[in-house]
């Protein structure tokens, strides 16, 4: 039986039709982010836009991501950590006949309860990608708007911490004092030299509110070109995240940090880890999301 699988996040929906033999029969990306949908709109858009585009009318569907939040189609709830990830497949929520949604995970975080939604499916896909990942102690970092740092022990999620690094970067670039530091078009967002300056400025990750003003201070002092300010800010924020959270989350294992996500963003994180003498390994976020959805569907029967 073919199945429609979807990774439905805040900004977009990635959807695949998978055949009975596991092959991808169709794929589309839709600009239907949960953040832009009105109340009750998800169900209508899924039936009227997504299914026809993929020739998947009446096909069973499994969805993960923010579509299962209180902003999405149906609240899919959370499963508490520590947890073996195969439990996720036993905790699906029915959003409509033939449509099920993957739950998120919840744990005791750094300063209170912490949650993830969507990354749990990536973790399932990451685990099944290599059998060796299911044993030993591992630290998995999933960079993004809300980066997740996850402790894994023998294939179980023991706990995790969220860092709002990506959202801070977007907000500081668009609002407040630092937005005036940008050059026209901010073309040098991939300026490695400016990024490395930001890594150095991050120090031990403490006093971040004070370190952030160095973006403005260096521009005024002529130590940083305006069109390098975005890369510098990115380096400062990622550097502070890595400097603060790796000692806290990674001190228990000597294994390399596993980076899961977008290749370009993970490369910047790898650069930050490398500056601190920490080895990393990379897995593509979209590939493991699909693998996770496949595995959850298989386990759910």
Image: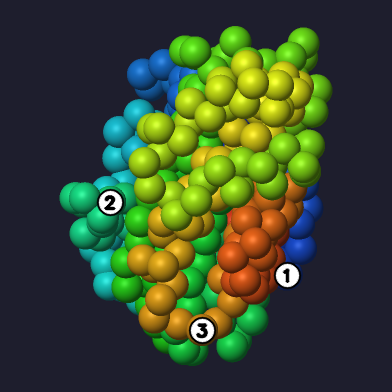
**Residue 230 appears in the picture as rendered:** yes
In what element is the residue under mark 1?
A: loop
Q: Sort mark 2 into few (<14), some (14-19) or many (20+) by Cα contacts within 10 Å.
A: some
Image quarter (top left, top right, bottom left or bottom right) of the N terminus: bottom right
Residue 108, quarter of the rendered image: bottom left
List x then y, in percent, for residue 73. Answer: 39, 33
**Cα gap from disc 1 to disc 3, whole angstroms:** 39 Å
Question: Earlier along the polypeptide chain: callout 1 or callout 2?
Answer: 1
In what element is the residue under mark 2?
A: strand
* Residue mark closest to the camera, 1 vs 3: 3
Question: Earlier along the polypeptide chain: callout 1 or callout 3?
Answer: 1
List x then y, in percent, for residue 217. Answer: 56, 23
Residue occupying the point 66% across, 42% down: 197
In this figure, what is the number of numbered marks? Answer: 3
**Cα gap from disc 1 to disc 2, whole angstroms:** 37 Å
Tag of residue 21? 1
Residue occupying the point 59% across, 88% down: 132
Tag of residue 114? 2
- Horizontally, is 100 left or right of 184 in the view? left
- Horizontally, is 76 left or right of 179 in the view? left
List x then y, in percent, for residue 240. Answer: 48, 48
Q: Which residue is mark 3?
A: 254
Q: Is residue 113 above or below residue 188?
A: below
* Residue mark closest to the camera, 1 vs 2: 2
* Residue mark closest to the camera, 2 vs 3: 3
**Cα gap from disc 2 to disc 3, whole angstroms:** 25 Å
Q: Sort mark 3 into few (<14), some (14-19) or many (20+) by Cα contacts within 10 Å.
A: few
Question: Earlier along the polypeptide chain: callout 2 or callout 3?
Answer: 2
Residue 52, quarter of the rendered image: top right
């Amino acid at each position: 039986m073919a199945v429609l699988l979807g990774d439905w996040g805040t900004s977009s929906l990635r959807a695949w039709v998978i055949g009975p033999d596991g092959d991808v029969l169709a794929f589309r990306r839709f600009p239907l982010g949960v953040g832009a949908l009105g109340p009750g709109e998800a169900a209508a858009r899924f039936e009227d836009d997504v299914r026809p585009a993929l020739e998947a009318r009446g096909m069973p569907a499994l969805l993960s991501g923010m579509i299962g939040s209180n902003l999405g189609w149906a609240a899919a709830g959370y499963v508490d950590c520590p947890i073996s990830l195969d439990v996720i497949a036993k905790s699906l929520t029915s959003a409509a006949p033939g449509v099920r949604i993957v739950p998120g995970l919840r744990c005791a975080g750094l300063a209170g309860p912490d949650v993830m939604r969507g990354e749990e499916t990536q973790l399932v896909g990451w685990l099944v990608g290599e059998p060796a990942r299911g044993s030993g102690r591992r630290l998995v970092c999933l960079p993004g708007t809300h980066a997740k740092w996850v402790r894994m022990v023998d294939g179980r999620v023991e706990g995790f911490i969220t860092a709002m690094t990506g959202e801070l970067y977007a907000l500081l670039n668009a609002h407040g004092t630092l937005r005036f530091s940008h050059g026209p078009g901010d073309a040098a967002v991939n300026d490695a030299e400016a990024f490395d300056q930001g890594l150095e400025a991050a120090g031990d990750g403490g006093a971040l509110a004070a370190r952030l003003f160095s973006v403005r201070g260096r521009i005024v002092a002529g130590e940083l070109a305006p069109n390098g300010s975005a890369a510098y800010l990115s380096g400062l924020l990622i550097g502070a995240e890595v400097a603060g959270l790796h000692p806290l989350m990674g001190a228990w294992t000597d294994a390399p940090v596993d980076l899961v996500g977008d290749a370009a963003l993970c490369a910047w994180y790898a650069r930050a880890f490398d500056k601190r003498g920490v080895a990393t390994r990379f897995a593509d976020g979209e590939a493991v999301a699909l693998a996770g959805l496949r595995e959850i569907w298989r386990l759910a029967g």
